[in-house]
Amino acid sequence: MHYNIRGTNLEITEPLREYVEKKLGKLERYFEQPIQSEANVKMSVLKDRQNVEVTIPLSGVLLRAEEKGNDMYASIDLVVDKLERQIRKHKTKVNRKIRQENDVKTLFIEDPVANEQQPHEEEEPFELVKTKRFTLKPMDVEEAILQMNMIGHNFFVFSNSADAEQVNVVYKRHDGTYGLIEPAK
């Protein structure tokens, strides 16, 4: 795996870089082949909060985790734990689908921690508890942000009138700013 490690309001020291590479390198045990993609790691310090974001694009799967805390090394450990849980969930989902299709090859290896003394977590199925349907009103991004704030949600789905009425999502970020999700063209 290749590493792209960046820091905001933080100098990436060699010991910190080595710690990130060592911890993320442990994720490779979950895969049949060595990971060829690049792990993007963004570390930042904002108001005494240590923030770590890791994104690893894989074939058909995007692994992403974020953690905030008072200690950068502890945040790195927690992010790696989140990524391992995501991998186990994807592995269970992929293997279940493959068993249904009677395929033989998987992206993930069967039991990477067979010799390790770690309790296996029960994989919980995803539970959909509510479905909403509504008509998307064409509006611009600013109006969508206003609508989101008026209803008190942290995201809002709308039809973007400035972009050929494609479905977009605006959301409120942890730092109080806003983000926009739009389909790739």
Image (cartoon, grey):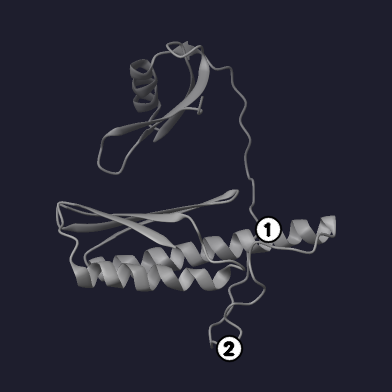
Q: Residues within 10 Å of mark 2 (few under 14, many from 20)?
A: few
Q: Residue at image x 46%, y 27%?
A: 182
**Could you tell whether 98 is left or right of 41 in the image?**
right
Q: Of the residues shown, which amino acid type is indicated by label 2?
A: Asn
Q: Looking at the figure, which quarter contains the N terminus? A: bottom left
Name which quarter of the figure residue 110 lies in.
Answer: bottom right
Q: Is residue 165 left or right of residue 92?
A: left
Q: Is the residue 162 above or below the residue 167 in the image?
A: above
Q: Which callout, 2 or 1, points at the residue further toward the start of the chain?
A: 1
Q: Which residue is mark 2?
A: 115
Determine the residue positioned at 52% across, 18% down: 166
Near mark 1 (Cα within 10 A), the count class, few <14, some 14-19 or many ≥20, is some
Spatial CA distance of label 2 from label 1 is 23 Å
Element type at marker 1? helix
State if disc 1 and disc 2 touch (CB < 8 Å): no
Classify residue 119 by image quadrant.
bottom right
> Residue 146: x and y, percent?
34, 20
Q: In the image, is residue 172 above or below residue 110?
A: above
* Callout 1 amino acid: Lys
Residue 181: assigned label: none
Picture coordinates of residue 12 (x, y %)?
19, 61
- Quadrant in the rendering for residue 11: bottom left
Q: Is residue 46 left or right of residue 75?
A: left
**Residue 14 at x, y percent in the picture:** 20, 69
* Left or right of 135 on screen, residue 55: left
- Check residue 93 in the rendering and tell me which mark sits there, or answer none: 1
Give the residue at x 62% y 68%: 32
Q: Nearer the viewer, residue 145 or 64?
A: 64
- Of residues 78 and 137, the one drawn nearer to the viewer in this rendering: 78
